[in-house]
Amino acid sequence: MAEEEQHREHNHQHSPGMHPSFLRVLEQKKRVKQKLSGIKHKIGVYSAKGGVGKTTVAINLAYALHKKGFKVGLLDADIDCPNVTMFLGIEDRKMEPVLPLKPIVYEDVKVASTAMLVDEMKRPIIWRGPIVTKMLGDFFENTEWGELDYLIADISPGTSDGPLTIMQVLDLDGFIIVTNPERVAGINSMRSGLMAKRLGVAVLGVVENMSSGKPSKTTEETVKTLGTELLGTVERRKEFAELTDKGKIHVAEDAGAQKEFNAIIDKLAKHP
Ligand SMILES: Nc1ncnc2c1ncn2[C@@H]1O[C@H](COP(=O)(O)OP(=O)(O)O)[C@@H](O)[C@H]1O
Ligand SMILES: [Mg+2]
């Protein structure tokens, strides 16, 4: 039977009236789920606000989990500004452009990023929505992670195509929402969490980054609005940016950061 006919039949039998493009998303979701079936927990690190520390939190969470003995993968799903390889100081590492794509192993964590598929780091990625959706979907479907305890995904900011595709196609356990003490971060983080909930993706908790140690009123409001819990705070440290520029992982260098991320992991582990 021709593929198109199969789609039509499927559509007719299971979902009368469903738009074919939505059906395509559902079918891709099934294939991605199958591809990632060897992974026990899949967690997205997200906020609609840029610059709050999504990449910082995703990387440190991944390496803190690894340090606790878990098998971990780190997926850079920020298609516009894929910064994970830069933060890790492995910008020159590329994935073999053959399918299935194999993540690079760095310090015992498997890392995959679309930055590993382009030749030049600073080349801007300027794609319209349908291309973003297609590229991300194909990237998820074609990356071979094998068996993992955790996959941590760094998500792009905003509430449109990038995060939307991830919410639709990647079968996540849920999101950790990153915010900072400022009201502008809190409000935009609320937006992201509410979007996730609306699309049926769980909010596992909130992390206040660049914190004074005590969550701000806005962070408390964010937690309440999202009906979730504060997983922890990560202090603002001037050494963080310096370490990042040197490609160093904070939890490996800073005992305070390690303690904070371990506390976040302990709270996360209480989720079913
Ligand atoms: N806890 C922190 N203390 C100090 N600087 C931080 C902290 N977390 C992140 N940064 C810095 O803030 C900037 C934005 O962080 P990044 O992780 O890139 O955010 P996002 O991924 O949300 O855009 C980076 O320069 C990073 O080094
Ligand atoms: Mg980032």
Image (cartoon, grey):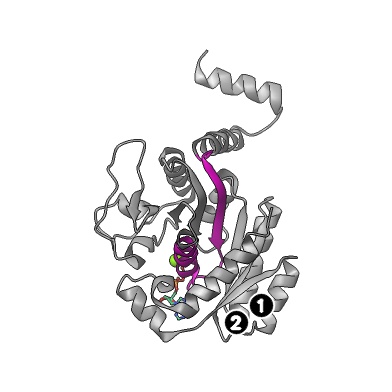
User: Element at badge 2?
Assistant: loop
Identify the secondary structure beneath mark 1: helix
Disc 2 + disc 1, Cβ < 8 Å: yes
Q: Identify the mark at residue 244; answer none if there is no mark.
A: none
The residue at the point 61 percent across, 73 percent down is 232
Would you identify the image quadrant in which residue 93 lies? Answer: bottom left
Magenta range is 36-64
Q: Residues within 10 Å of mark 2 (few under 14, many from 20)?
A: many
The residue shown at (75%, 65%) is 227
Residue at 68% x, 57% y is: 271
Question: Which of the 4 image quarters holds residue 158?
Answer: bottom right
As drawn, 129 above or below 211: above
Give the image location of residue 136, x and y in percent: 45, 47
The answer to whether one can see residue 52 in this image is no
- Crowding around mark 1 (Cα neighbors within 10 Å: few <14, some 14 to 19, many 20+) is many
Residue 170 screen position, x and y as percent: 55, 46
Horizontal and vertical percent position of residue 155: 50, 59
Q: In the image, what residue occupies the spot 31% across and 52% down?
A: 116
Q: Does 65 lie within the magenta span?
A: no
The residue beneath circle 1 is 219
* Quarter assignment of residue 9: top right
Q: Tell me, yes or no, whether the highlighted magenta stretch contains residue 51.
A: yes
Amino acid residing under circle 2: Pro
Q: Which residue is mark 2?
A: 181
172 vs 126, nearest the viewer: 172
| Ligand 2 quadrant in view | bottom left
- Look at label 1 and name its amino acid: Thr
Camera-side residue of 57 and 252: 252
Among the two numbered marks 2 and 1 on one chain, the one whose residue lies closer to the N terminus? 2
